[in-house]
Amino acid sequence: MKTEIFTDSTLSEAVSLLKKGELVAFPTETVYGLGASVFRPEAIQKIFEVKGRPQDNPLIVHLGALEDVEKVAKNPPQLFFALAEAFFPGPLTVILSKHPSISPIVTGGLETVALRIPSHPTAQKLITLTGDPLVAPSANTSGKPSSTTLEHVLDDFSGKIAGVIEGEPCQFGMESTVLDLVNFAVPTLLRPGAISKKAIEEMLGYSIEIYQKGPQSSPGMRYRHYSPNIPVFLFRTKEELARHLEKGKKSFVVSCIEEKTLYAHLRHAEKKGYDEVLLISEFPLSDALENRLEKILELPSLIPSV
Ligand code: TXA
Ligand code: MG
């Protein structure tokens, strides 16, 4: 299959492909998404296949407008509308009870559904023109760093998906904040992102929880994530980094760790044949970065021995 590249001026061709049940990757303000119509289960099945994604890891549904929430969720609480007013469109995903018309393939068999309204103009136009909400996981092979550029998407999926849309850069570079409004007594953060816990608490006027690992965890939390095929080490002091550098490996050193560029650095280092990525930060990072780094560095063999 030839992967077509579209732009905002050829969006209608991408829309036709989506309506035919094909996969089209598109930019959002967080990362690129690998899109399919929420009402095309056979297309959604292809998402799991091309990504190599475990079937029980549910997908986020992307809406064009707030009124579409009725199509995918059942009885959203008032709290949802308050959050939507404050943070939509933007990098916040909310977990609600699912509408009966949503296939279990979208939700990994759960009775809940994740949804958000992206603010990226290309994503907005694409969803509106398609007329259906779009499911879209991050557009990367399962386990790899998310894609933040057209080139990343092609590196993973060229020849495997029908199309990809080139658009304005992904403003944030890291996946959305995921907030569960269903499974806990108080709203609970399943994944930190650009919308901070503090911003949500300030808006609500009370404290929310951060999910700690356990059986009710977001299914995505069980899998290894965001990692290149080369080891990644994090150093908290320059001395530790200097000691490691004495080993004489071909190291790609990142001394400015930012949400917007972390994934691009990891992908670049792997593609250019470096032996390892060395991250150095003498200061605590944002909750979103600390969360992703915890997963990237998760395997014991990747934790620096110095
Ligand atoms: O910024 C983003 O959220 C990007 C862009 C493309 O929108 N998408 C994204 O999708 O990061 P994905 O599939 O890579 O991550 C979705 C996360 C996974 O951890 C998944 O387990 C969780 O959301 N999730 C989806 N539906 C859920 C549900 N019903 N309950 C709990 N967690 C859910
Ligand atoms: Mg992902």
Image (cartoon, grey):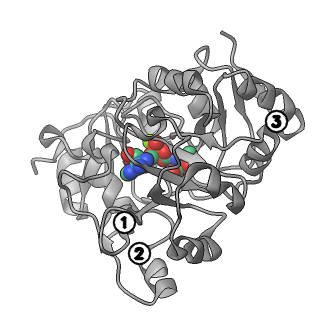
Q: Label 1: how many residues lie within 10 Å, few (<14), some (14-19) or many (20+)?
A: many
Up/down of 248 relative to 175, above or below: above
> For the residue marked with disc 1, what is the amino acid?
Leu
Name the residue beneath numbered marker 2: 197
Tell me which label, 2 or 3, sits earlier in the chain. Answer: 3
Q: Residue 74's spot in the image, x, y percent?
A: 52, 56
Between 118 and 258, the residue placed more toward the observer is 118
Q: How far apart are marks 1 and 3 (CA)?
A: 34 Å
Tell me which label, 2 or 1, sits earlier in the chain. Answer: 1
The answer, for residue 265, to whether it is visible in the render is no
In the image as oriented, which residue stretches furthest toward the right? 9
Residues at marks 2 and 1 touching, judged by CB atoms closer than 8 Å = yes
Mark 2 vs mark 1, foreground winner is 1
Tell me which label, 1 or 3, sits earlier in the chain. Answer: 3
Q: Residue 176's spot in the image, x, y percent?
A: 50, 57
Mark 2 vs mark 3, foreground winner is 2
Between 248 and 40, the residue placed more toward the observer is 40
User: Which residue is painted at 54% across and 76% down in the image?
Assistant: 78
User: Which residue is painted at 62% across and 20% down in the image?
Assistant: 161
72 relative position to 246: left or right: right
